[in-house]
Image (tube, grey):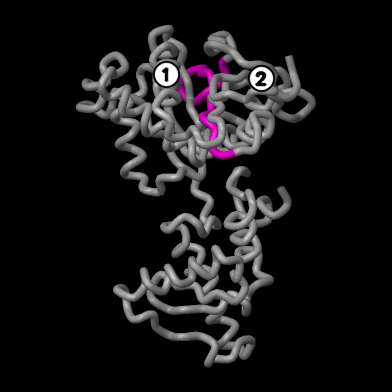
Amino acid sequence: MNGSFSRERSGLYRVVRRQDRWQVEDSVEKFNGDKLWTSKESKAHYAAVSGKFENVNLAGSLLGKHIVGGYSKENYVLPTDAEKSGNEFSMYWVEKGAHKDKTVAEDLASIIQQSDKNKIPVNWLVHDAGTATFKEAAKILKQKPLADAGTRAMYPETVGRTGQCVYFSNPSISSEKELKKLCVDAGMKYVGMNTNNRDLKNWTTLRNVAGEMGKATLKKAGTGGVAAGAIAASAGGLDGIPKVAQNAMDSLLSGNYYSAALAVGAGSVMVLGAVKKLPSVRAAARCTFGKGNQYWYADDSSLLSA
């Protein structure tokens, strides 16, 4: 059954590739073990944990791009194989405000355990705030681990023999070390992550995009495009960065992002108004104040055209 769902409760849904797009078909109780995509080591079912979306249909239509983008990036699948008509993946939809709900985490952990028990290899895509749900599920799985989880944690070369893999897209936790630990706790294999470095609400990525924009601004200043007096050369050293960055964030979140002074990683300060036409600035504005994180991030141009 295709269409909108009047009560979009957290749970498992089936998403099918039809007419060159992903469509949510219906809610289900378990994975369809017969729906496996050709993968790196062997065939596997694919599944996603949703981040923040307005509704289940929108989440299903967009998360397929994250799955294909992430796993093709790591050479697990070919886009031409993954996006064949009739292919399907499972999506664990998390309703608004429920990403840290214990009951939802328990449900997700149960699904992971059942797929392992039934020997269904699954490559997971965890998106955005879905990372918080996965984190809580990992705590549960650590107490009730998958088969041989302790052995796999002790001997990393055996990780993934149950076929439970995880890729993170725009995760709410930006530390790769922490993400890897979550996978170890859950007894699953960490595959990789793709971070949207245009989301300025994320403290870690704030500095990344600031550095790029700052270089462009300083370049403009050198060619006379910006008055040298408009750029402060120092933010008081490394100790001063957090304060300057916080002031910048306050300005950004108040909506004054074109005039906000944004901290550059090494301590310089630049003026956003001088480079507001740069794709990186426009992409950052879309992600920070819009819904850019809902899309798979490959580069600024693809994000702006989404």
User: Of all residues shown, which one is farthest toward the right?
Assistant: 19
Is 87 on the left or on the right of 131, as rendered? Answer: right
Q: What's the residue at 53%, 18% (across, down)?
A: 45
Using the image, tell me which numbered label, if any, was put on residue 112. 1
Mark toward the start of the polypeptide (2 vs 1) = 2
Judging from the image, what secondary structure is the residue with disc 2 in?
Answer: loop
Q: Which stretch appears magenta?
A: 36-52
Magenta span dominant secondary structure: loop
Q: Position of residue 208 (x, y in %)?
A: 46, 62
Question: In the rendered image of this protein, does residue 48 appear above or below residue 87?
Answer: below
Please name whichever residue, 270 or 46, is drawn nearer the observer in this view of the structure.
270
Q: What's the residue at 51%, 64% (across, down)?
A: 209
Please name whichever residue, 5 or 183, is drawn nearer the observer in this view of the structure.
5
Q: Position of residue 65 (x, y in %)?
A: 63, 36
Question: In the rendered image of this protein, does residue 111 appear above or below residue 82?
Answer: above
Q: What's the residue at 41%, 70% (across, down)?
A: 265
Q: Which residue is mark 2?
A: 87
Question: In the rendered image of this protein, does residue 134 appear above or below residue 214?
Answer: above
| Magenta-colored stretch includes residue 225 | no
Is 218 on the left or on the right of 241, as rendered? Answer: right
